[in-house]
Image (spheres, rainbow, N blue to C red):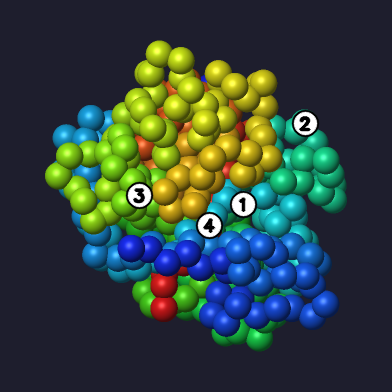
Amino acid sequence: MQGTFGKPGFRRTAVLLALMGGLLLGGCPQPEDGGAAAGNGLAFKMVRVPGGRTFPTGTDDSGIPATVDSAYEIGETEVTYELWYMVRAWAEDRGYVFNNNPGREGSSPSTNNTAPGANRQEPVTDVTWFDAVVWLNALTEWVNAETGSSLEPVYCYDSGYTTVAKNSNTSNFAKEDPGYSYASAYAKPGAAGFRLPTSNEWELAARWQGSDTGNTVSGYTDPYFTKGNSASGATASYSDATAAATGAVAWYDGNSSGKTQAVKGKAANGLGLYDMSGNVWEWCYDWHPSYSGLLRVIRVGNWNSRADFLRVGHVDYSKPDYRDIGTGFRPARTAH
């Protein structure tokens, strides 16, 4: 399936630009929850997820359990158009190229490279997988410039990690295998910059319930995990009679009024993450296991999806050069 609309004990770190020191940039107010403020009054937060956790998989929780060995951080929200626009504009002045793709304010009809407007807090959409990985490199460099940190960009054009990816045109990337339909961006081991989450990292964060025992998978207690047939953070299956459990945590075809919504408009999940189900599909780094070299993983439903596409155990896919007004992404970063 395409990733299109209609188809389909942790420690919170309130991080904005400065992941390492909670820096407060000159003259900017400090937001709630201990976060630090970003340049131009913008901030984003990352949430730490402990490593060494094994979790259930599959919409019925009968899949092979998966383990994420290392701790990582994942965005509290999907990347907003406002943040996308600011970083992209900064990066384009420094040699980054986004293949003539300005992104879009959610499902807004405007794609003419406009400054953020009324929908600035809606997720950026209309971005390819290649746009996302290049933008995350740009985010890393922007954070360095704003805070004086020295995070290393993650994505390179080549398997030798000699050239940082700064142009999202697919012709710049190499294929992992001559038989593949699509090229790849190579993730440099040990690089501390921003990146896409892996599918397993995404699912661990989406299922995490901590000490909350409601609607959890039997046999898992540290932490408890949301059942695979439910939206992230929901107290019941996607098919509960009134859909109230899904509607409390997710925007989908039953409540979105036919469009994207501002981030953080629904209740957070057990890790304090918003919109892990619905609003927009989210790119993950991985090839889909059944379609290596052809399709990348996307998770999990959007504003125009049926409720069953919002299940945390559901894994979907899309061509990496595909873009639409139902697909965005959120940042991740290996914890150091």
Question: Which residue corresponds to mark 3?
Answer: 208
Residue at x 25%, y 35% (from the top left corner): 58
**Residue 336 or residue 98, whichever sits in front:** 336
Tell me the quarter of the image containing the C terminus.
bottom left
Q: Earlier in the sequence, mark 1 or mark 2?
A: 1
Q: CA distance from mark 3 to mark 4?
A: 14 Å
Mark 2 nearby-residue class (10 Å; few <14, some 14–19, many ≥20)? few
Q: Is residue 229 left or right of residue 140?
A: left
Q: Secondary structure at mark 4?
A: strand
Pointers 1 and 4 in contact (C-beta within 8 Å): yes
**Residue 107 or residue 313, whichever sits in front:** 313
Question: In the image, what residue type sits under mark 3?
Answer: Trp
**Residue 119 or residue 53, whichever sits in front:** 53
Q: Earlier in the sequence, mark 4 or mark 2?
A: 4
Locate residue 26: give its quadrant: bottom right
Please state which of the two labelled residues, at mark 1 or mark 3, is closer to the viewer. Answer: 3
Question: In the image, what residue type sits under mark 4?
Answer: Gly
Question: Which residue corresponds to mark 1?
Answer: 79
Locate residue 324: give its quadrant: top right
What x and y, as percent, mark residue 57?
A: 24, 41
Tell me the quarter of the image containing the N terminus.
top left
Q: Give me the disc on residue 243.
A: none
Mark 1 nearby-residue class (10 Å; few <14, some 14–19, many ≥20)? many
